[in-house]
Image (cartoon, rainbow, N blue to C red):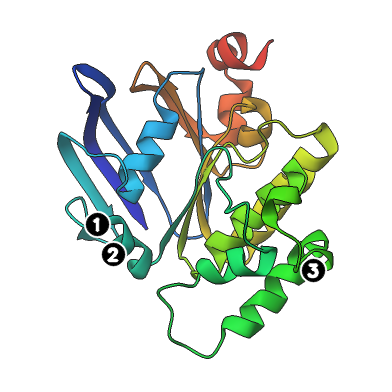
């Protein structure tokens, strides 16, 4: 589904991504873990096209897309849930969801709204409320739902549990697993490395813009080097 080859990206003279290569196969969760400042968010932003790259290739279903603008990547089947949710606070919940389908012309938008409401019942109860009045967990549900309205093949998820109580965070990650089980490919960036690797088919550890460890999620959980550095064991 996704291949990233020797990707590099910088903010001015500071290189945030230094030759990163990884892949995500169809229908799997790939977790990217690492400390703050490791380059995880920059990597997702580069994949979705909102962060310029200085070198490397991004292949989506075998086609090079590194020169494509963000909206073109959405049209191809990629959706990005950004760090911090970034919902449109003054707009109603349902309007936020409909904005996720801005490129679609088909007749299935209403059915997809119903699917999102079934997946996240709190959104159904507050569909006519403004997004800015939602709790943090509800805003995260809304951000994910908005991305799903684009009917993506690949979902890029940046820190979905950030700032959430443990129970809500687990509910969000359970939803991520359900989406994977339905066939969606997911690249997950998550500060909670234990939780991210526990649901991952494969994982990669980033340190200062480079991948230092990779393997199945379970293998990385059991790796003493990863445990000592990121899992508190």
**On-image quarter of the N terminus:** bottom left
Q: Position of residue 122 (x, y in %)?
A: 82, 60
Above or below, 55 against 61 in this view is above
| Outermost residue, bottom side | 107
For discs 2 and 3, the disc positioned in front in the rendered view: 3
How many C-alpha atoms fall within 10 Å of the one at disc 3: few (<14), some, or many (≥20)? some
Residue at (25%, 54%) from the top-left corner?
Answer: 59
Q: Secondary structure under badge 3?
A: helix
Residue 185: mark: none
Circle number at residue 72: 2
Residue drawn at (62%, 35%), measured in percent from left and top?
Answer: 196
| Marks 3/1: CA–CA distance | 33 Å
| Callouts 2 and 1 close, C-beta under 8 Å | yes
Splitting the image into 4 quarters, where does residue 161 fall? top right
Q: Secondary structure at mark 2?
A: helix
Count how many numbered circles sit on residues in the image.
Answer: 3
Q: CA distance from mark 2 to mark 1?
A: 5 Å
Report the side of 151 relative to 76 (left or right): right
Q: Which residue is mark 1?
A: 69
Q: Position of residue 113 (x, y in %)?
A: 66, 75
Query: In the image, is residue 56 above or below residue 174?
Result: above
Residue drawn where x is 60% and y is 53% of the image = 143
Pointer 3 residue: 124
First along the sequence among labels 2 and 3: 2
Q: In x, y percent, where is residue 159?
A: 58, 36
Q: Earlier in the sequence, mark 3 or mark 1?
A: 1
**Which residue sits at x=51%, y=17%?**
35
Q: Nearer the viewer, residue 176 or 222?
A: 176
Q: Callout 1: 10 Å neighbours few (<14), some, many (20+)?
A: few
| Quadrant containing the C terminus in the rendered view | top right
Give SS at disc 1: loop
């Amino acid at each position: 589904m996704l291949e990233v080859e020797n990707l590099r990206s910088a903010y001015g003279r500071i290189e945030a991504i230094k030759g990163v290569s990884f892949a995500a196969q169809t229908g799997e969760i790939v977790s990217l873990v690492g400390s703050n400042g490791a380059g995880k968010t920059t990597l997702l932003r580069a994949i979705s096209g909102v962060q310029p790259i200085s070198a490397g290739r991004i292949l989506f279903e075998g086609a090079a897309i590194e020169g494509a603008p963000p909206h073109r990547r959405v049209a191809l089947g990629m959706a990005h849930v950004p760090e911090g949710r970034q919902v449109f606070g003054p707009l109603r919940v349902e309007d936020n969801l409909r904005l996720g389908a801005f490129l679609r012309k088909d007749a299935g938008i209403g059915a997809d709204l119903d699917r999102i409401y079934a997946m996240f019942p709190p959104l159904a109860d507050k569909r006519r409320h403004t997004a800015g009045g939602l709790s943090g967990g509800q805003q995260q549900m809304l951000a994910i739902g908005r991305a799903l309205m684009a009917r993506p093949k690949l979902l890029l998820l940046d820190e979905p549990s950030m700032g959430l109580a443990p129970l809500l965070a687990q509910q969000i990650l359970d939803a991520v697993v359900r989406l994977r089980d339905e066939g969606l490919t997911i690249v997950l960036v998550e500060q909670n490395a234990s939780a991210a690797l526990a649901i991952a088919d494969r994982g990669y550890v980033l340190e200062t813009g480079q991948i230092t460890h990779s393997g199945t999620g379970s293998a990385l959980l059991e790796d003493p080097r990863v445990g000592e550095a990121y899992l508190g064991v």
